[in-house]
Image (cartoon, rainbow, N blue to C red):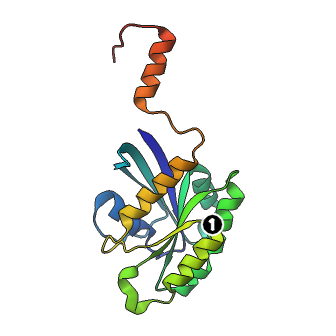
């Protein structure tokens, strides 16, 4: 089973926590956070994996902590609210944080959350798609409230992480097989 740590980055009140909760617990909630982690096992392309979502604080006073979260993560979601132009305009700050801290090109998706509130839209879908093209990443509009595209978001990111991983994490059975070869043992007792 492979394991991935994904950090959710974006301004406060864009729905990072709600996306993480909807993905892991299949429910909608709002709970402002400084940092929290949500974990889920799932099957992507017939292969079991473990995903940990690090829910980060978006406020600028937590910028120092953000670098630590970025350092520990393997993949990212950059989240903005389609109902708030200012959250869209600040995405470059979070992207630059990833680029500054990661030694290799970060794997991430751009996410326009709250698509269930289309009547309050301030950022068009086309603008989100254009920004994703300029960032060189995939794009999705989601709704944590209605669960629209939430599973798609995380399974797509797992696929991207797997395809870019030059040395994928070994599966448990591969580790055991390697130990058997090394010890030339006929049986294992666990």
Quadrant of res 69 = bottom right
Picture residue at 58% right of the left edge, 38% below the top: 167
Residue 25: image location, x then y, percent: 30, 59
Residue 189: image location, x then y, percent: 33, 14
Residue 2: image location, x then y, percent: 45, 41
Between residue 122 and residue 55, name the one nearer to us.
122
The quadrant the N terminus occupies is top left
Residue 85: image location, x then y, percent: 55, 86
Residue at label 1? 136
Picture residue at 58% right of the left edge, 72% below the top: 132
Between residue 23 and residue 47, name the one nearer to us.
47
Picture residue at 44% right of the left edge, 51% below the top: 52
Between residue 76 and residue 186, name the one nearer to us.
186
Disc 1 crowd rating (10 Å Cα; few below 14, some 14-19, many 20+) is: few
Q: Is residue 87 visible?
A: no
**SS at mark 1 in the image:** loop
The quadrant the C terminus occupies is top left
Q: Is residue 59 left or right of residue 147?
A: right
Task: State the count of labels.
Answer: 1
Q: Is residue 184 visible?
A: yes
Quadrant of res 150 = bottom left
Quadrant of res 88 = bottom right
Answer above or below: position of 158 versus 16. above
Answer above or below: position of 34 versus 115. above
Picture residue at 43% right of the left edge, 63% below the top: 153
């Amino acid at each position: 089973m492979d394991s991935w740590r994904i950090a959710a980055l974006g301004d406060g009140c864009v729905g990072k926590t709600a996306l993480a909760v909807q993905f892991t617990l299949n429910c909608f909630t709002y709970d402002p956070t400084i940092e929290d982690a949500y974990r889920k096992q799932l099957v992507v392309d017939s292969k079991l994996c473990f995903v940990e979502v690090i829910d980060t604080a978006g406020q600028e006073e937590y910028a120092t902590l953000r670098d630590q979260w970025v350092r520990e993560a393997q993949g990212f979601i950059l989240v903005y609210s389609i109902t708030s132009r200012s959250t869209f305009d600040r995405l470059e700050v979070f992207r630059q944080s990833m680029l500054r801290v990661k030694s290799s090109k970060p794997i991430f998706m751009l996410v326009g959350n709250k698509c269930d509130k289309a009547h309050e839209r301030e950022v068009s879908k086309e603008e989100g798609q254009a920004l994703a093209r300029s960032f060189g990443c995939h794009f999705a509009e989601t709704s944590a409230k209605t669960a629209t595209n939430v599973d798609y978001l995380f399974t797509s990111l797992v696929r991207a992480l797997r395809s870019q991983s030059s040395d994928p994490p070994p599966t448990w059975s591969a580790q055991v097989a390697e130990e058997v070869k090394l010890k030339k043992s006929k049986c294992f007792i666990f």
